[in-house]
C-alpha cells in the first residue's frame, strides 16, 4: 500500500534529528542510531520508511520508570541508579514499539523493525539530544515522550526519513 506524507501521524527526520506531530503542530529534538541509518538486523541502525505504532507500554508508569523487555522493573531512574548500572541502555517512561510496513525493506527476514525491537522511548535527561547516540531506537526526553504517548494512538502512521522533511511545505499542503 502506498502512503503519502500527509497521512503520517509522526514524521521522524533523521537528518535534523527531529520528530514532528504535524496534526498537533509539535516538534521534538530526538536521538537516533549512532551506527547510522539502515534496516539490517543487529546493525544498531535506525530504520527508514513507513511504520506504525504496533504497541504502547507505560500507560500508568511514572516519569523515569525503568523498562526491561517492555516491562516496568519497579525502578525509577535517578543518578544513584545510573551510577550503580553504568552499562545499561536505559529505556524510560514510555515505549511506542514500531512495526515496519514495507515488505523486504523494514518488514520481513533480516530487516524487520518489529523483530529488531525498534522503539520510540524515553532516555535519561543527561543524554544528549540532536545527535545520533542510540542503538537504533528513537530516544526522546522523558517529558516529551510522555506527551507524545498521550497524543498518539496505537496504529498511528509513522514516516522515518533520512532526508530533511520540510514541515512548512507539508503543513501548507495540509492546510495547517
Image (cartoon, rainbow, N blue to C red):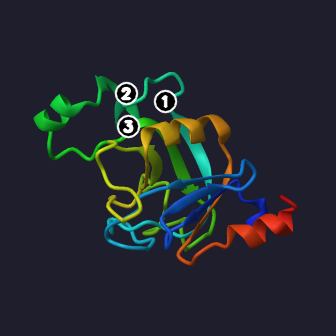
Q: Quadrant of residue 148?
A: top right
The image shows residue 169 at horizontal and vertical percentages of: 76, 72
Looking at this rendering, what residue extends furthest in the bottom direction? 163
Q: Earlier in the sequence, mark 3 or mark 1?
A: 1
Residue at the (33%, 55%) spot, across then down: 128
Distance between the Cα atoms at labels 3 and 1? 9 Å
What's the mark number on residue 72?
2
Distance between the Cα atoms at labels 1 and 2? 8 Å
Q: Classify the position of the N terminus by image quarter.
A: bottom right
Residue 166's place in the image compared with 112, above or below, is below
The image shows residue 14 at horizontal and vertical percentages of: 49, 69
Residue at the (68%, 46%) spot, across then down: 155
Q: Earlier in the sequence, mark 1 or mark 2?
A: 1
Q: Quadrant of residue 50?
A: bottom right
Residue at the (45%, 71%) spot, across then down: 39
The residue singled out by tag 1 in the image is 58
Front of the two marks 2 and 3: 3
Distance between the Cα atoms at labels 2 and 3? 9 Å
Residue 8 visible? The answer is yes
Please state if 84 lies on the left or on the right of 66 as rendered: left
* SS type, badge 3: strand
Q: Earlier in the sequence, mark 2 or mark 3?
A: 2
* SS type, badge 1: loop
110 and 55: which is toward the camera: 55
Q: Are marks 3 and 1 in contact (CB under 8 Å)?
A: no
Q: Are marks 1 and 2 in contact (CB under 8 Å)?
A: yes
Looking at this rendering, what residue extends furthest in the left direction? 84
* SS type, badge 2: strand
Q: Classify the position of the C terminus by image quarter.
A: bottom right
Residue at the (38%, 68%) spot, across then down: 45
Amino acid at each position: 500500500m502506498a502512503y503519502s506524507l500527509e497521512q503520517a501521524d509522526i514524521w521522524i527526520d533523521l537528518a535534523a534529528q527531529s520528530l514532528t506531530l504535524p496534526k498537533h503542530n509539535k516538534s521534538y529534538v530526538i536521538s537516533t542510531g549512532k551506527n547510522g541509518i539502515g534496516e539490517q538486523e543487529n546493525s544498531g541502525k535506525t530504520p527508514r520508511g513507513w511504520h506504525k505504532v504496533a504497541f504502547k507500554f507505560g500507560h500508568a508508569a511514572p516519569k523515569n520508570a525503568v523498562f526491561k523487555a517492555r516491562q516496568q522493573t519497579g525502578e525509577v531512574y535517578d543518578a544513584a541508579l545510573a551510577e550503580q548500572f553504568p552499562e545499561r541502555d536505559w529505556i524510560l517512561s514510555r515505549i511506542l514499539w514500531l512495526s515496519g510496513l514495507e515488505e523486504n525493506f523494514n518488514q520481513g527476514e533480516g530487516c524487520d523493525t518489529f523483530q529488531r525491537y525498534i522503539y520510540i522511548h524515553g532516555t535519561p535527561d543527561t543524554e544528549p539530544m540532536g545527535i545520533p547516540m542510540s542503538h537504533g531506537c528513537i530516544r526522546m526526553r522523558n517529558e516529551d515522550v510522555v506527551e507524545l504517548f498521550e497524543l498518539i494512538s496505537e496504529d498511528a502512521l509513522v514516516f522515518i526519513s533520512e532526508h530533511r522533511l520540510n514541515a512548512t511545505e507539508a503543513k501548507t499542503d495540509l492546510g495547517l
